[in-house]
Every structure is written in structure tokens, then in C-alpha cells.
Amino acid sequence: MTQNTYLDSFRKTFEISTEKMLEIAYGFRQAMEAGLQGQESPLKMLPSFIERPSGNEEGVFYTVDMGGTNVRSTKFKLSNRGFERLGEVKSRLKDPDGNYDYTNENTSAEMLFDFFAKNTEKLIQQGEQQASLGEGPKLGHTFSFPSRQVGINEAYLIEWTKEIKVAGVVGNNPNKLLKEALQRHNIDIEPVAILNDTVGTLLVAQYTHENADIGVIMGTGYNSCYLEGKHPLTGKEMIVNMEAGNFNIKLPLTKYDIEIDKRSVIPGAQLLEKMVSGYYIGEIATLIIEDFYANKAIFDDTDSMNKFRSKKIEIDSLDVENYILYPERTTHVLGCSLDDAMKLKDISKSIVLRTARLVVATLFGTLLHIEDNEIKNEHVIAVDGTIFEKMPNVPELMQQAMDELTRSPNKIVFKLVKDGSGLGAAIAAAVAEAKSY
């Protein structure tokens, strides 16, 4: 097989047709509805116990946001449908220099949440501690891992994802663990809401977009949520966290995806996430390029391949700057030919295009559920995360794919929502405080 034939074969393997998107969409809708009714489904359909915000929420609120790479503690002031960020402390969960690692099995729950408490403590100004115990500021906690939610302030971790393995958290309520850590440090801030970052993204969008009813995270991990009009538990509106990264029906798995799954901490789980999220797609790219090299379809010399292997693929696991936007720069970095650099660009673009179309297929399935199979209304889909924000052309590719499916250009629109995991947690805390009166 010639080099160009091998590249053409690869492209076909990664193509997602309109028909395939529709097949995935219908499977996704069926999985949603099974999960809502408590039947077997790859979608956990977790209730958030949070409805659409009124827009009248006001006050100063703290947030803690744990993602797959960092933890942030932030202080917000909400008023008149706007916000002001009063302070923020951000730390990596794993020190690049190896001084600490709050992601592995040697870390206890107490160690992890004490780390969060110390970050929060840095935000507190003198005088705020003068309030009586229990009357201090309220906190919203974004915890972006599959959890069984039983109330706005009570959730239990089902399992770790994103390769995190901290001991003593699975089966427990992270907000209770956070509250205990804050108390150990004599910090009078009360956690009142726990939510997923995807739910937070939708909450932020709902402040400014009346038609916003789906939230998506496309970053280190992948997930989506939506506003259920009449939830089986309450009969009222409720945001549902689907844990969409675990979807596995009719997915076009390649040999590379199967290998990624085998190497992961939990084989067989989070299959969609392993195909579209920042944590994994760089590893997919690496496997593809190793395969090309083994079949003499890229890099005629060993030096270029060794340079590629030694250069960690960055920016949520695809090197946007070198491999997609600037092939000429790739030739300089790797010492390869322009022809090889263009192949790297083609491979990267194929991965990004597949990511966009797989995600849109599941979002179309969500719309089919919301509108009972015939999409008549306009919708805003709120998206946060570096894949959507930084990958070249991802918003345009997603819009094109959605227009293919709806056959009605721009009826469904995508909006970048920044800091859903931070500001969204503050809004959730405000909603929780308002409900307590």
C-alpha cells in the first residue's frame, strides 16, 4: 500500500457520514429515555435538583471547582444578571516537578479536600470571619465526576474518571468532605450546592439566553446536560447531568480507539469520552502516527520520528499550533519534509472533524428528546472547554454538522460560555440560598 493510499484509507476510517450521525442520535435519544425511567442505559441521567435560575439572584459567593487537571477557588459577586470576580486561587492537582500528586491512590480524601480548603482560605479577607457560625458566605462546589445526586447539596461519587484514583471518596458526598475540611481549618464558609461543570455551563448561559437548554463541556473530559421539562422525580423543570462521556451505542470504534480503551484505567467505560476529549485525543493521534510510521507511510528517517516521540503533544492533547495551523513550523520542529508535515495536518484535522461530528450527533439526539422527535423551536447550546474554544474550526464544524441534521441553518446555535464551572457554581449557590428562605 502506497503512502497516499494509506492516508486515504485512514481518512475513510475516521469519516462520520450524515447517516451515521443520525444512527448515533437515535441511539442517544433512546438511551436518555431509558435512563430517565431507571432502565439500563449507558447514560446515568443524574438529577441536579437545580432548575433554571430566575436572574434575580444576588450576593457574594465562593466556589470550588475540581476538574481533571486543576482545582480553583473563586469569589464572585452576583447582581443584576451580571457578575464580578473578586478573587481566584488556582492550583494544579499534580505538581509538574513531582512535589505532590493529589490524583493517585496514595492520596486520601482528607488530604485532597484539605488542599481545597487551603486554596479557599487564601481568598478570605479580614473581617469576613466575624459572622456567627453558619451565617458566613455560601459556597457552590463544582465536582466534575459521575455522582448520584439526591439533593442540591448532596451527591455521592459513583466512580472516578479522568484517570483520578484518590482513595476514600467513591461512595461519599464530596460536599460533606469539603465542609469537614473547611471546619478543620476554621473557615466559616458553608457549601450549599454541588454540581457538575456541565450543569454550571448551562446555568451561566440561561442568565443571558432564553433558549439555552443544553450545556456541554469539551475539554479534558466530555459531558453534556439539558433542561428536562418535567422530571419524573418532581414533575417540574430540572437540569439533568447525562454523563454523556459514557455513551457507547453505535459508536464507530477504530483499532486506535480500542487500543486506547484497553490501556485506560477502566476499560469498557467512557467510550465516547475516549473518542472526543482532550485527555485522550492526543494519545489517539500518537497511535495513528506510530501506525503510519510502522507501515512506512510517514517519516522516511528515524530522527524525525524520534523527535516526534520526544515532543509531548500539548494544548488538550493536539498540538494546534504546529500540526494543524502551521505545517511549515512542523518541518522545523521535527526536521521532516513538508509532505510529512501535511500528513500530520491531515491526521489532526480528521481527528478534530470526527470529534465535532460525534458530539453533534449526541446533541441532536438530545434535541429529539426535548422536542419529541420533531425539532420546531430554536435552541442555544452552551459549550465550554478548550476543544471548542481553541481547536481550529471546531465551532464551525459543529454548526455545519448540526445544520446537516436539522436541514435548517442556524436554527440550533452554539455559544461559547466561559467559566461555567466557576460562575455556574456561584449561581447554583445563589439558587440554593434563595430556596432555603
Image: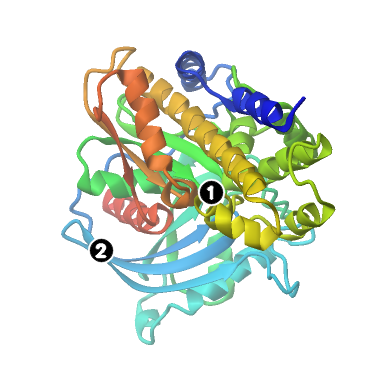
Q: Quadrant of residue 59?
A: bottom left
Q: Is residue 232 above or below residue 352?
A: above
Labels 1, 2: front one: 1
* Disc nearer the start of the sequence (1/2): 2
Viewer-side residue, 91 vs 314: 314
Residue 83 is labelled as 2
SS of the residue at dot 1? Answer: helix
Residue 236 is labelled as none
Callout 2, which amino acid? Phe
- Extreme residue in the left direction: 80
Place of residue 370 in the rendered image (x, y in percent of width and height, measured from the top left): 33, 22
Q: Are dots 1 and 2 in contact, CB under 8 Å?
A: no
Residue that appears at 50% across and 13% down: 23
Callout 1, which amino acid? Ile
**In the image: residue 416, left or right of residue 357:** left
SS of the residue at dot 2? Answer: strand
Mark 1 Cα shell of 10 Å, populated few (<14), some (14-19), many (≥20): many
Viewer-side residue, 22 vs 394: 394
Residue 220 seen in the current view = yes
Distance CA(mark 1)–CA(mark 2)? 36 Å
Residue 324 is labelled as 1
Q: Is residue 63 above or below residue 297?
A: below
Residue 146 seen in the current view = no
Mark 2 Cα shell of 10 Å, populated few (<14), some (14-19), many (≥20): some
Viewport quadrant of the N terminus: top right
**In the image: residue 231, left or right of residue 413:** right
Place of residue 354 in the rendered image (x, y in percent of width and height, measured from the top left): 54, 31
Viewer-side residue, 143 vs 286: 286
**In the image: residue 167, left or right of residue 73:** right
Place of residue 257 in the rendered image (x, y in percent of width and height, measured from the top left): 70, 32
Q: Is residue 234 above or below residue 31?
A: below
Residue that appears at 53% across and 57% down: 321
